[in-house]
Image (cartoon, rainbow, N blue to C red):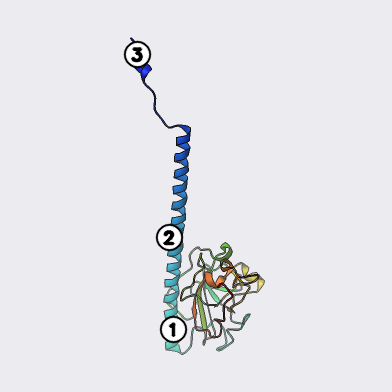
């Protein structure tokens, strides 16, 4: 009489089946990571929009009471524009810029309320951005500068803003720059992924700075 076990086959996965399972798991993991990163990026952008809107209300309220905007210059009415002006900007305490730029917890002068601080983020060239403010008392620019991962075209998109965040290329500080090709993605043919203006959320009352953007912007 034959033993029963001699007629029983052991079942299991073949090598091909295991490889298929591994590939499917890898694809699902990649999709999950991409979706999660997209959710994170949208959440950061939404927070930055909210932060800029709340600080803008504080700045406008200050102007309503004092008859001028909080100033980052010693002299009322100094030229905020044209490019390479003398108005040094204030950045929040996490600004990755040169030491000659003021990066402060209270980065808008005269505002007593606790101000938001920038979160870890990447914009153009995977360089970090931060919250920046500049004003001569008459005009002001307020921005979540280079804090948007993907190019955007919202009501907070303007063709004015600030310099790069990689040490400001030795220029000694952050200044307002207006529709500048070097930071506007138009140095050699327009590239929205190199356009700091489109990777930022900016508000202000500058005039004459929203010139016709480069073709494709």
- The answer to which of marks 1 and 3 sits earlier in the sequence is 3
Q: Quadrant of residue 77?
A: bottom right
- The answer to which of marks 3 and 2 sits earlier in the sequence is 3
Residue at 42% x, 68% y: name it.
Answer: 46
Q: Horizontal and vertical percent for residue 75? A: 57, 87
Q: Horizontal and vertical percent for residue 166? A: 61, 67
Q: Secondary structure at mark 2?
A: helix
Contact flag, marks 2 and 1 (Cβ < 8 Å): no
Q: Horizontal and vertical percent for residue 23? A: 47, 43
Task: In the rendered structure, find residue 3 and report the number of the disc placed on it.
Answer: 3
Residue at 39% x, 25% y: name it.
Answer: 10
Front residue (pair 113, 151): 151
- The answer to which of marks 2 and 1 sits earlier in the sequence is 2
Q: Which quadrant of the figure contains the N terminus?
A: top left
Front residue (pair 101, 213): 213
- Report how many numbered discs are placed on residues in the image: 3
Q: Secondary structure at mark 3?
A: loop
Q: Where 84 sits versus 147, above or below?
A: below
Identify the residue position indicated by label 1 in the image.
60
Front residue (pair 174, 202): 202
Disc 3 to disc 2, C-alpha distance? 60 Å
Q: Quadrant of residue 8?
A: top left
Question: In the rendered view, does 8 fall on the left or right side of 196?
Answer: left
Instruction: Indicate which label's residue lies in the foreground, 3 or 2.
Output: 3
Identify the residue position indicated by label 2 in the image.
39
């Amino acid at each position: 009489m034959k033993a029963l076990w001699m007629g029983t086959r052991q079942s299991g996965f073949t090598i091909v089946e295991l490889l298929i399972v591994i590939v499917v798991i890898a694809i699902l993991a990649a999709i999950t990571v991409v979706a999660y990163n997209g959710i994170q990026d949208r959440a950061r952008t939404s927070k930055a929009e909210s932060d800029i809107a709340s600080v803008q209300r504080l700045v406008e309220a200050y102007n309503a009471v004092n008859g001028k905007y909080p100033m980052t210059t010693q002299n009322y009415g100094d030229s905020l524009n044209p490019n390479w002006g003398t108005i040094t900007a204030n950045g929040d305490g996490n600004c990755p810029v040169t030491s000659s730029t003021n990066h402060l917890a209270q980065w808008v002068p005269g505002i007593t309320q606790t101000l938001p601080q920038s979160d870890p983020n990447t914009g153009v060239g995977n360089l970090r951005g931060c919250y920046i403010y500049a004003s001569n008392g008459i005009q002001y620019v307020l921005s979540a500068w280079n804090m948007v991962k993907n190019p955007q075209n919202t009501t907070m998109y303007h063709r004015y803003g600030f310099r790069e965040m990689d040490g400001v290329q030795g220029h000694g500080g952050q200044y307002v720059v207006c529709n500048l090709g070097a930071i506007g993605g138009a140095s050699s043919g327009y590239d929205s992924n190199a356009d700091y203006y489109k990777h930022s959320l900016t508000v202000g009352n500058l005039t004459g700075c929203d010139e016709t953007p480069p073709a494709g912007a």
